[in-house]
Amino acid sequence: QRVCQKHNLLYYAIGGTCIGAIRHKGFIPWDDDIDIGMMRCDYLKFLSIAKDELPEGYEVDSYDSPVHRYSGFSVVTNHHGTLFDPGLLEHYYMCPFPAGFDLYVYDNCPEDPDERQKWRRDGMRYILPMELIKKKGLKDRETKDALKKVGYGGSYSEEDYYPLLRALAEKTDLIAGRYADTNTRYVVQYTYYIRDNREPFLEKKWYDEVGKVPFEVGT
């Protein structure tokens, strides 16, 4: 909230976090994370300033970060894995697990149905080899064929695992933001939208204004 207010960025509680805010005035009792959404312009600006603005010890994991996150969203976190260091445990109120939030980007979606289908297909060309790499590895024939179709043919070793995923994720992200400068009626979370193969339904005007609701100890 501090960072977004300082830089005039809009953010939204989404998913279980939104439900929890309305229904429980905080976390859903069985939920264990926070889901935040941003329009692409604000999302990119947040990523560019996060390193300098986030509290000490926090960082952003995305496709181009050292942790290599390729899930279609970024994560703001205070650490990775499980903490055992007594000093850090005391600092984080004896919580040994990562704390932070998932950050989802909303992209403008083209109006024309044919154009939307092309947008989907373009992204799936890169999503498919990414999923195959993670599920079947680089030596699998299906993986090799999918990589070849997007210009990454050749022989790869395990050292190429993360560089390839990063390159494919970057291509997907560029496609997702293709209509960033176009005035559109709908927005979508691109990597989920292209898999669902359903019509867009989130109207951009719904996000023009934001309201505040109580959440745990703040708003």
Image (cartoon, grey):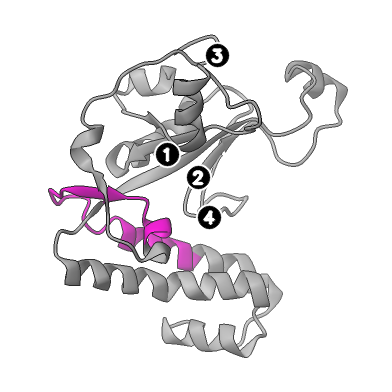
Q: Quadrant of the N terminus?
A: top left
Q: Which residue is mark 2?
A: 74
Of the two numbered discs 1 and 2 on the same chain, state the one appearing first in sequence.
Answer: 1
Name the kind of residue labelled 4 in the image.
Ser
| Location of mark 3 (residue) | 216
Report how far apart the C-alphas of labels 1 and 2 lie in the structure.
Answer: 9 Å
Give the residue at mark 4.
71
At a point 75% along the width and 16% down the height, the residue shown is 93
Distance of label 3 from label 1 (alpha carbons) = 26 Å
Q: Give the residue displayed 80% in from the left and 20% down from the top.
A: 94
Q: Quadrant of residue 49?
A: top left
Q: Which mark is residue 47?
A: 1
Q: The disc labelled 2 sits on which kind of residue?
A: Ser
Magenta span includes 201: no
Q: Amino acid at mark 3?
A: Glu
Q: CA distance from mark 2 to mark 4?
A: 8 Å
Q: Is 109 placed above or below 13 here?
A: below
Q: Earlier in the sequence, mark 1 or mark 4?
A: 1
Q: Residues within 10 Å of mark 3 (few under 14, many from 20)?
A: few
Amino acid identity at mark 1: Leu
Asked whether disc 1 touches disc 4, contact meaning CB atoms under 8 Å apart, the reply is no
- The crowding category of the residue bearing disc 4, from other C-alpha atoms within 10 Å (few below 14, some 14 to 19, many at least 20), is some
Q: Which mark is residue 163?
A: none
**Left or right of 121 on screen, residue 62:** right
